[in-house]
């Protein structure tokens, strides 16, 4: 039987990706001396918000997700960010595996709402990696297939600047908001009837009419 352990050495933006994509560099160690022929690795990445401190401004941005601070002991719980997978080549002892972490900036996605609200650079984003998958071994009796136990996990503290730099590189000074088709059609009619040059200007006009100050 193989005995695997996982450590996250770093998480960094993928510089040449067409869409926002982080890469988690993993150190995978096998401690029994078995020869690993290949490994199909799956990973669930969770955000662990109770392991972080928050400024008052961040708390205001997290109000929709967790409610006021007085409720955080009950509401601040780990939640899933993504599921991802990769295939590792054969190794003995240890190896380094790059795990892709595709990201979205859609404000309707809970994880994006959470990440967008974070600003304090001195308080990193707490991540939890939960591993599973299949290991293909090679020995004197031929090939064997083993499951990676569900208790294999690792944690990582992702600097807020890494996330913000990734988003800024792909969506400079912009964000994504999903609207119902009827709402979008009504917004387009408002834009046309008022002679506005774009939907962004139409939204700004409506917000200003409601007394909201746009920085």
Image (cartoon, rainbow, N blue to C red):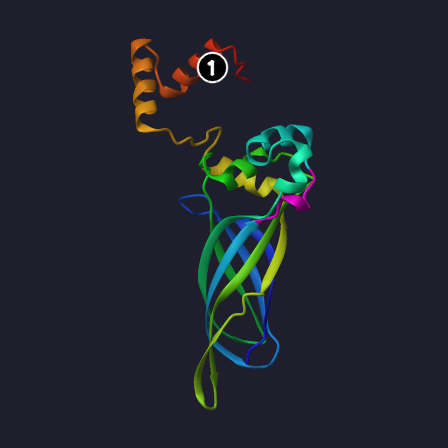
In what quadrant of the picture does the C terminus appear? top right
**Total numbered labels:** 1
Q: Is residue 21 above or below residue 35?
A: above
Q: Which residues are magenta?
A: 47-53
Q: Which residue is mark 1?
A: 207
Magenta span contains residue 39: no
Report the residue at 50% width, 65% height from top. 132
Return the residue nearer the eye: 197 or 169: 197
Q: Position of residue 157 (x, y in %)?
A: 64, 49
Return the residue nearer the eye: 81 or 8: 81
Report the residue at 52% width, 80% height from top. 35
Q: Position of residue 199 (x, y in %)?
A: 37, 20
Q: Is residue 122 left or right of residue 191?
A: right
Q: Position of residue 84 (x, y in %)?
A: 46, 56
What SS does tag 1 mark? helix
Magenta span contains residue 52: yes
Report the residue at 40% width, 20% height from top. 200
């Amino acid at each position: 039987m193989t005995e695997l352990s996982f450590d996250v050495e770093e998480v960094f933006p993928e510089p040449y990706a067409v869409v926002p994509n982080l890469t988690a560099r993993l150190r995978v160690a096998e401690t029994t001396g078995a020869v690993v022929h290949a490994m199909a690795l799956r990973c669930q990445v969770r955000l662990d918000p109770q392991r972080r401190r928050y400024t008052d401004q961040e708390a205001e941005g997290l109000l929709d997700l967790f409610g006021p601070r007085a409720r955080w002991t009950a509401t601040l719980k780990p939640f899933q960010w993504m599921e991802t997978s990769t295939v590792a080549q054969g190794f003995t002892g240890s190896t380094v595996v790059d795990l892709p972490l595709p990201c979205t900036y859609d404000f309707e996605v809970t994880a994006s709402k959470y990440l967008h609200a974070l600003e304090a650079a001195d308080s990193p984003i707490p991540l939890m990696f939960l591993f599973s998958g299949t290991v293909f071994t090679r020995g004197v009796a031929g090939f064997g297939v083993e499951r990676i136990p569900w208790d294999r996990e690792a944690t990582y503290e992702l600097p807020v600047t890494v996330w913000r730099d990734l988003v800024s590189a792909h969506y400079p000074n912009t964000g994504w908001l999903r609207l119902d088709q009827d709402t979008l059609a009504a917004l387009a009619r408002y834009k046309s009837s008022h002679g506005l040059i774009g939907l962004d200007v139409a939204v700004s006009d409506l917000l200003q009419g409601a007394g909201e100050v746009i920085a």
